[in-house]
Each structure stands twice: as C-alpha cells, then as structure tokens.
Amino acid sequence: MSELFITRLHELTIVIYAASVFLYFIDFLNRNRKANQIAFWLLAFVWLLQTLFLIGYMYETGRFPVLSLFEGLYFYTWVLISLSLIINRLMKVDFIVFFTNMLGFIIMAIHTFAPPHNESNVISDQLVSELLLIHIVMAILSYGAFSISFVFSLLYILQYELLKRKKWGKLLWRITDLTRLEKMSYVLNVIGVPLLLLSLILGLQWAWIKIHDFVWFDSKVIGSFIVLAGFSTYLYMRVGLGKQGKALALWNIGSFLIVLINFFLFGQLSSFHFWYE
C-alpha cells in the first residue's frame, strides 16, 4: 500500500469516528436507540481499522508501536476504544462510550494531523528493549484505566448535580446510580495504580542501566510520581478514611488532569524521555 493511501485511510477512519461520536451525541440528547446502535457498529469498525493498522505497523517495523509520542497516542486511543466497547457490551452504562470516545477522538485527531517529525527516529536500537517496551505498554494501560475512571467521576458529578437540583428528567434515569459510578471509578483506579507503579519500577530500572547521565529529578520522572501519588491518595481516602461522594470524585478528576499534564507537557521538558521527542 502506498503511503498516500494509508494517509487517506487514516483520514477516513477519523471521519467514521466523528460520525460515531455524533450519533452517540444524538443518543445522549434524545435517547435514540437506533442512533446508539449505528454509532456502536461504526465505533467497532473504527476499532477494527485501528487494529489492522497496528498489526500492519508491527509487521512493517518488527516491534510494538509505542516508542514515540506519535505511536503512543495511537495505541492510547486504541486502548480507550477497546475499553469503551467492552464496558458498553458488558455493563450497558449509558453515556460511558460517548464521553470516553470524545476524549479518544481528540487524541486520535491529534495523532492523525500531527507533524511528521513527531514519529520517533531516535536511537531505535537503544530503545528497542523488552524492559522499556513493557514499561511503556503498562504505563499506557494504566492511563487508559485512569481515563475511564475519570469519565465515571464526571458522570458522578453530573448525576449528583441533577439529584441535588431535583431535575427528574430522562438524563437522570439514563445515567446509572451514584453508587455504581463511584464503585467503577474505584475499581479502575485499583487496576491503574499497580500498573503505573510497576511501569515506573521497570522504567527506572531501564534508565539506570541504559542512560549514563540519568537524572532523578527529571520532569517526567517527577510528574509520573505525582500522578501515582494522586491516585494512591484517592485509594487511601476511599479505603483508609472511608471517604465517598463528590469530594472523592473531584479528587479523581483533578488527578486525571495531572495525567494529561504529565503526558503532554512534562514529557516535552524531559531531558531523556526519547519517547516524547
């Protein structure tokens, strides 16, 4: 396949993805089940195309595609879509797919229309290490768990405000109850925190071995530990202090904002994270 054809196919995927998000928005406003079903199958088609792109890229390069920001964004979007499809089929929680894929669409658009220089071409032989590969994959999976947890917390705040203002409309009944939203947010953080911790351990071990001028006070290292501290504090507040409710949801949302800052900003300031160059 020519490079131009692949580019056009990526752009077509964006269009299909946009149509899916648009139909989910119609369902969000008017509870249109037909729009929901069409949106789901369009999203499933996007997932299929993304999966084929990932497999083709792995075949072409001979490695898993996570060693640059350009690649990492694509894999992150694939994780978000995969999780949203699974949640939609297993849990039937309205709006989760819509809000998750609003985030996924933004990330995929950034990936598709990013300048070509974002694709990694730095010391690939040095970077292709199983230790580093596992570190990056586990970090992205943890970010995926935190992303879905963030969506559940947003829906919790929305549902809380609707109940507080006694707005008994269709929107209220289509969002699942507060207890379930809070529980799922908690469960996803229980998954994300150990994944991130293990990722950091492996990443620091790789850096200590491979990078001679490794700096412990690097912005990306500090940012990652701040993210870990934020979500670990959430778990301590939930389990150790028994806190629940709006305050916990707001803490979770704030912690995810740190994830975004760490992912996009701190990586650019890092002195050795080639993945973000």
Image (cartoon, rainbow, N blue to C red):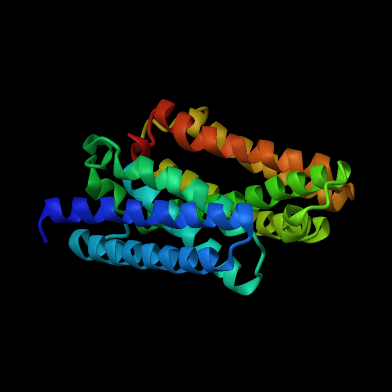
Residue nearer the viewer, 218 or 67: 67
The answer to whether residue 116 of the structure is visible from this angle is yes
Q: Farthest bottom residue?
A: 90
Q: Farthest left residue?
A: 2
Instruction: Left or right? Give the position of 104 relative to 130.
Output: right
Asked where in the image residue 114 lies, by quadrant, the reply is top left
Rendering coords of residue 3 (x, y %): 13, 52
Rendering coords of residue 172 (x, y %): 77, 54
Name the quadrant of the N terminus: bottom left
Q: How many numbered markers are drawn?
A: 0
- Please name the residue shown 15% across and 55% down the image: 5
The answer to whether residue 205 of the structure is visible from this angle is no
Instruction: Left or right? Give the position of 124 relative to 260.
Output: left
Rendering coords of residue 193 (x, y %): 64, 52
Residue nearer the viewer, 232 or 217: 232
Rendered position, 12 above or below 265:
below
Instruction: Left or right? Give the position of 91 relative to 1.
Output: right
- Please name the residue shown 53% across and 56% down the image: 24
Name the quadrant of the C terminus: top left
Rendering coords of residue 263 (x, y %): 48, 38
- Please name the residue shown 81% across and 45% down the image: 162
Rendered position, 89 above or below 144:
below
Instruction: Left or right? Give the position of 15 relative to 144.
Output: left
Residue nearer the viewer, 246 or 191: 246
Residue nearer the viewer, 145 or 95: 95
